[in-house]
Amino acid sequence: MSVDSPSQSGLGSPAGNPGDEPLLQVEHVSKRFPQILANDDISFSVARGEIHCLLGENGAGKSTLAEVLYGVQRPDSGTILFRGLPVTLSSPRDAIQLGIGMVHQHFVLVPPFTVLENVIIGTQHQGLRLDRRQAAERLGGLCTNYGVNLDLDAQIWHLCVGEQQWVEILKAVYVGVELLILDEPTASLTPQEVDKLFAIMRKMRDDGLSMLFITHKLNEVLEVSDRVTVLRKGKLVHSVATRDTSQRELARMMVGREVDLNSVREPRTPGLPVLEVDGLRVRDDRNLEALRGVSFTLRQGEILGVAGVSGNGQRELFDALTGARKPFAGLVRLAGREITHSTAAQIADLGVASVPEDRVHQGLVMEFRVDENLILGKQRLSPFANGAFLNQRGIAAFAEDMIREYEIATPSGGQVTRVLSGGNLQKVILARELAREPQCLIVSQPTRGLDVGAMEYVRRRLVAERDRGAGVLLISEDLDELFSLATRIAVMFRGQIVGMLDAETASREQVGLLMAGCESTV
Amino acid sequence: MTTTGQGMPRGAGAGQLTQAKASARGRWRIQARMQPSAAWRSVSILAALLGAFVLSALLIASAHVNVGTALGVMVQGAFGSRGAVIETLVQATPFILTGLAVTVAFRGRIFNIGAEGQFFAGAMAAYWLATVLRGAPQAVMLPAVLLAGCAGGALWGFIPGVLKARYGASEIIVTVMLNFVIALVLSFLLANPWREPTSYFYQTALMPDASYLPRLVSGGRLHLGFPLALVVAALVWVLLWKTTLGYEIRAMGINSLAARYKGISVATTTILVLVISGAIAGLAGVGELTGIHHRLRLDISVGYGFAGIIIALLGQLHPVGVVLAAIFLGALLNGASAMQIVTGVPVALVNAIQGITLLCLLIADVLARYEIRRTAGND
């Protein structure tokens, strides 16, 4: 093993240090799945002590590449060199033995076990007895080193999402990995938790650990990485030192054309109230009070943002407003008419359209054809129905129009919906919901998981609805999205709106603190 | 690197072992097929029949019966003559209807295991109305009896429907229990109030002639129930793919959450599905009652309702598939009883052969959705 120079890297150019070969070299790796070439002749390298970003849209092949490097998938061709030697990764066990760890998007922790137990699971190979004291000492040392404040005896399910992620990272660091793969680690964190994560990542880098950081968020790339490799449609577009690039250039490389995600907010004078919510109280599936008296007014020509970490009542708010869940107290009025206890069908008929957060489960019937999904909920209305019968001609004509207008990538309306990409699924929902020019639009996480191109499209549509005069309630965890689209931002915490801010004057920190429900998170 | 003392012990030696472990061989992997083609499906069905044939042959040989003779008789018995074909269709008639009943329910992901009970409920309602209308002309009697059968089955489907829609009771449990309830009610009625006074058996008297389903051919038992079943198959197809209700049933079946979010009333649709499913199963009961037996007995169904589940699944929950599967099962039954009579193969063996055949088909159906691939090693 080569001798490490303790704090070499920082912003140093990775390949430039003499006598220091890259930690990981990927050479001409290809991986094909039945329908798609997920990785097409990918070559890049990760230097020691480097935070290396793997940037790309959904479906660009980032996750597949990560799985190849972690031994989950085997490449069809190509070579992987670790510490200069070719390696075969047949399973994650191989990867871990070599010194490659991974923090998954969805954590793999044992909830009733303590932090300490989760970290040392599977690490003690000699004998049956756990040497807790020694392990606790070492883990405590790691925590101190990285400035992580964790109760080692706390059970996992008591921890918040950000803390659980630290446990995942500690697990990898504890067994002594040299390369840590982080798969979209910021997806469910508050802004403060993201800052904390980045601070830890920088500290680990300075200690000589290399990280492969997978993301599709441009600002994160610029903030934390030393080097960035951009993938598009399975191919490597460019691998460049982060300081030599810009957000604009990265976006262009990622999407393959110029994109504009901002500049859609413009001051307007909102019109009459569309949706008035007063003291709304709703129970969740476990019969606990999830909305504890929510009040707000949404006006015509306005996008009202709802911020919050997921699980603070946003889902129940969406459900209550669309009629999928019955409130037990409070009042909802649509253009002056009370709809508190109306059914989902009645509310839709009155001109409320909705885009649910979970496209696949709440919004679409995946085994249906595209044209069938385009009329879901309107199947009894003209021109889709003729008495008790479906009007196939009307449905087909509508589908053809929508596929053209919304540029849905499908050969025909007869295509089964399941095979469409995330962006196209969202377009199907948007086409269906916007076709009748709703007076009120309730959308939840409309761009979550979408690639930049689709994201831009969805946002443009929402703004167009606003400009048409519709009131838009935008529930989102993406602060960038809220700040670029919304006029006002309501922040939800534990079932209440804890702040209503003017998007023009509010700061991200303000919103972040309100989201966390207190002055400081960590 | 580790100035802090407890930093990161690097797995220095451990890695080298794995690096040496290079495998040049490919691996066999089982993975799901993206979309199994129709041709592939047909091949899998043929393979299943071949497998069933081989296994059955082994069974027959073990009973010291000439395999060739036995199987020859079986095919003869199923399709070998005009009479055999007619009898196969007679056997298929209740299978088609119960298969369709289950198909409608399963399409909406309502697991109606109660087609057997609905079959009896239909037959009982039909019998009751026929005795009430005794003396009425056939033109009145026949439609009335058929409708009564549908109504009886529908009622026996309505009960689990309401319990599920209102109280969330599992339709599986309720429909299974209702099978027992109706069987015990029928036993009671046959033991006393409805029993033919002069009969030694638990059975009713013969029904009025006007209620008999007309026979379609001379010298065979094929009755109006068979074309009626084909009409119902067509209606089920129209219902599922051409009506708004069918659209809602399928939407609910694939994704009830999305259906609910988009304003489809899951409760109402659930009740309707079970009522329709029950009505079709009830019609199967009338068909057997007024087409074959002409009197109510406990054995007018030999598990037709349960066979409906197998047929619906074999038929891929599609009316055309259901009709084909029902005819196939009818042929199997018919051929097997011929084999039993001619060669003296024990009844148990005949049942085993039927079971083997169905198992092979179901296994093939599952296996056809996967493929085995050789993945290349990466060296």
Image: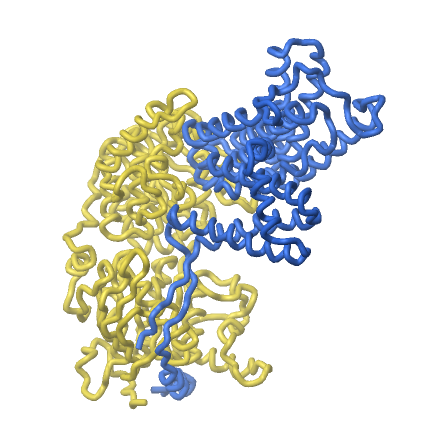
In this view, the residue in front, A179 or A270, is A179
The N terminus of chain A sits in image quarter: bottom left
Residue found at x 26% / y 59%? A60
**Which color has been applied to chain B in this rendered view?**
blue
Residue at image x 31%, y 33%?
A299
Is residue B131 or residue A192 the one in the foreground? B131
Q: Residue at x 32, y 49 (%)?
A: A422
Q: Please, which colouring scheme is shown?
A: by chain
Above-or-below relation of A45 to B100: below
Up/down of A42 relative to B166, above or below: below
What colour denotes chain A?
yellow
Q: Is residue A178 left or right of residue A17?
A: right
Is residue B309 something that shows in the picture? no
Q: Position of residue A443 (x, y in %)?
A: 35, 41
Q: Is residue A276 left or right of residue A227?
A: right
Between A202 and A512, the one lying in front of the other is: A202
Query: Could you say where residue B29 lies in the image, as x and y percent from the top left?
Result: 42, 65
| Residue A517 percent across, percent down from the top left | 43, 54
Residue at the image point whose x is 25% and y is 48% from the top: A454
Q: Which of the image's four quarters has the C terminus of chain A? A: bottom left
> Total of numbered circles in the picture?
0
